[in-house]
Structure formats: structure tokens, C-alpha cells
Amino acid sequence: MAPAYACGCGAMVPGPATRIAVSGEQSVLRWDGRQEQIVMRLTVGGDAGRAAWIMPVPHRAAVRLGDPALFAQLAGAVAPVRRTRYHFWPREGDWPFSGAGTADGAGLPAAAGPAAVGVVGRQRLGPFDVARLTATDPAALQEWLHAHGFSLPARLKTALRPYVDRHWEYVAVRLVPRTHGTPLHGALDPLHLTFAADRPVYPMRLSRLAATPQSLGLYVLAAHRMEPSGAIGGAPPAVVFAGRLGPREDALGTLAAGTPYLTALTQSFPDPARVSGDHELRRAAADTPVQPVVHDDELRRLAGIPVWSLTVGGALAVVVAAVALAAVRHSRRPVTPPPPVAPPEPLG
């Protein structure tokens, strides 16, 4: 387990002489044309009793706790539909064979910092100590983190440079367990960020610091189907679900109000060092729905009897009947008597 200097949407920095790993990350991005919301939940492990999580954002962000039920509702919304697929001839698991059937699928304490860092907000949210920062120099962010007991790795300092050049801000979160003295472990409470955005963007640049292959699973809520504008150094992104959500009276319904089209994306990054930027999302050419399907294969039956056996039995019966009929006809056919034998001629 290595220090988690990178996760899909930001960077994780553990305390001194401790380690932390991000074993899971779930995120949903909502964009209504002028404002973006990101709700994320991280699952962590390791021996770190505290850690700092840093996420770059293009504009000043408001931060609050998210609803933990949201991700279960999203999983239910994109779950595969089950459809029965009939076959005529028996397979393994069908009579008269034995075995199992088959199925297949159609496929996350503030103090005044140096002059280059501005603390524009601070709040306590559950187990999180949240600070919203502006930074004009990665070294200034490093000093701020150091003042709060964290060290900024040199590689992370370099990776933050493009965000500084673009005048992005940071959400810096100090993570502490609910029970004092225990390590951070398991699924953390979701965080809900809201900021202005003229186009939807999901920060991914810091993933290039990861030491192992990474994967992205992202839900996108918008007025239409969305797609990444490029692969940013990973495998081609795949759409595993796309479709409009119906009326709902739950956390997902509240978040999706005004942005009812849900697109679920997945992407792998076999070589994280090749990640070249952030995911910028755009409207797809068409709102073509995508629905995963799990097929239940069943033998076609009629009144509980396999159709193939009725067909084969019927064919055999026809053959037997034809043979029997031919035999009967043959037995009733009149026998032609042999021609008479001429008497022998008398000897001369």
C-alpha cells in the first residue's frame, strides 16, 4: 500500500509516517449549463489517523455533506434489465442434459496562511475540516499544508502547477475519523461541491501521479446525453447507461431536477502517467439510450413440455406412420400369378 497522492478527482495526502489508499471512488457530476455540482464518496484504507484531500476547482466552491443514499439510487437506476431469451435445442442445464444454466450481461484548524494563499472559507462537516483556498503558487499551498501537519510531495507540487497557471482554486479537506485514535477506513461521508461552470469538467490531471492502473466510473446528469471530449491518455471511454430518469421522490430525483438525462461512463487508465488533463464533457450527437441487459436463457416449452421433444417426437411419429402405411399398402397389393408354364413338346 502506497501513499495515495492521487485519486480520480484530486489528491490524498496522509500524515507523517502513515499510509492511506483509496480503494474506491464514486462520483456524480450535474451540470445545468451554468453551474456544476460534484458529489463524491471515497472508500479508504490504511493506518492513517488523518489525511488531507485536495481537489482543484475552476471557480469558488460551496461545500456541504452529500446524501449517502444517492449512490445506491444511482446503482439501481442503471441496473441491467432482465430479459428472457428462448432457445429451441436443449443446452447444458436443460433436460436431458445436466449442469448449471448460463447468463450474460450486455456489459468515489484553519490559520492564516502565507500571502500567496487565501483562506476564503472554513467549515466543519461531519468528520471533515473543510477549507476553501486560493493559491497563486504551489509552494504557498505546500506551506499551508505544512502548517496543518501535512507534507506536499514534490510530484504533487509539480502536478498542481497547471491549475495555478489557470487561476483555479482548491478545496482542501482534513479528514479525521469519527472515533479518535482509529485509522480512516471504509466509505467516508459524501461531499457535495457546487461551483460556477460554463462547461462541465471533471478534474483528472492529478491521476497521473498514481502508481497503479486506475479506473473511472462517473455518473453525469445533464439536459442531454453527455460524452468526454477525449480519452486524455486512457482507453476509449465507454457508455454503460444512457437514458432519461422518470419522476423520483428521493435524493437522486432532487439532484436530477432540471437535468434528467443520466449518462454513466467508465474508463480505464492502464498507464496513469499518460493522463494529459481533465475530462471536459460535451453534449453527444444524439440522446441515444443505452440499457444494459442480462439474458435469462430458457428452453422453449409448450404446456411444460420442451418444444424440441414434441417436434422430434412428432417427426418420428410421422416417419413411423409412413413406414406402417407403406407396409400395409404393400401387404394389400394383389399378387400377380406367375405366367403359365408351357407343356413340354413331345419327342419326335
Image: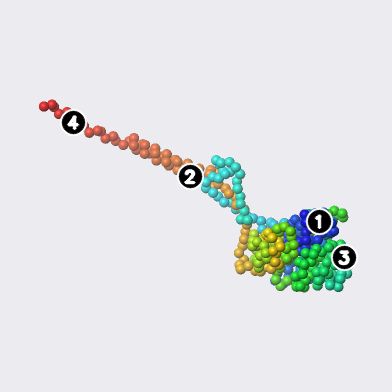
Amino acid at circle 3: Ala
Q: Is residue 322 left or right of residue 64?
A: left
Residue ID for mark 2: 311
Residue ID for mark 4: 342
Q: Quadrant of residue 332?
A: top left
Q: Residue furthest top?
A: 347
Secondary structure state at the residue bearing disc 2: helix
x 68%, y 59%: residue: 270
Image marks 1 and 2: residues in contact by CB distance under 8 Å: no
Label 3 and label 2: CA atoms lie apart by 82 Å
Label 2 and label 4: CA atoms lie apart by 58 Å
Q: How crowded is mark 1: few (under 14 residues within 10 Å), some or many (20 or more)?
A: many
Residue ID for mark 3: 147
Label 1 and label 3: CA atoms lie apart by 20 Å
Secondary structure state at the residue bearing disc 4: loop
Q: Residue 214, position in %: x, y?
A: 71, 59
Closer to the observer: label 4 or label 3?
3
Q: Earlier in the sequence, mark 1 or mark 3?
A: 1
User: Where, quadrant-wise, is the C terminus in this rendering?
Assistant: top left
Amino acid at circle 4: Ala
x 65%, y 61%: residue: 235
Amino acid at circle 2: Thr
Q: Residues within 10 Å of mark 4 (few under 14, many from 20)?
A: few
Label 4 and label 1: CA atoms lie apart by 119 Å
Q: Quadrant of residue 236?
A: bottom right
91 lies above or below 6: above
Closer to the observer: label 2 or label 4?
4
Q: Residues within 10 Å of mark 2 (few under 14, many from 20)?
A: few
Question: Is residue 254 among what the camera can see?
Answer: no
Q: Is residue 209 left or right of residue 239?
A: right
Label 1 and label 2: CA atoms lie apart by 67 Å
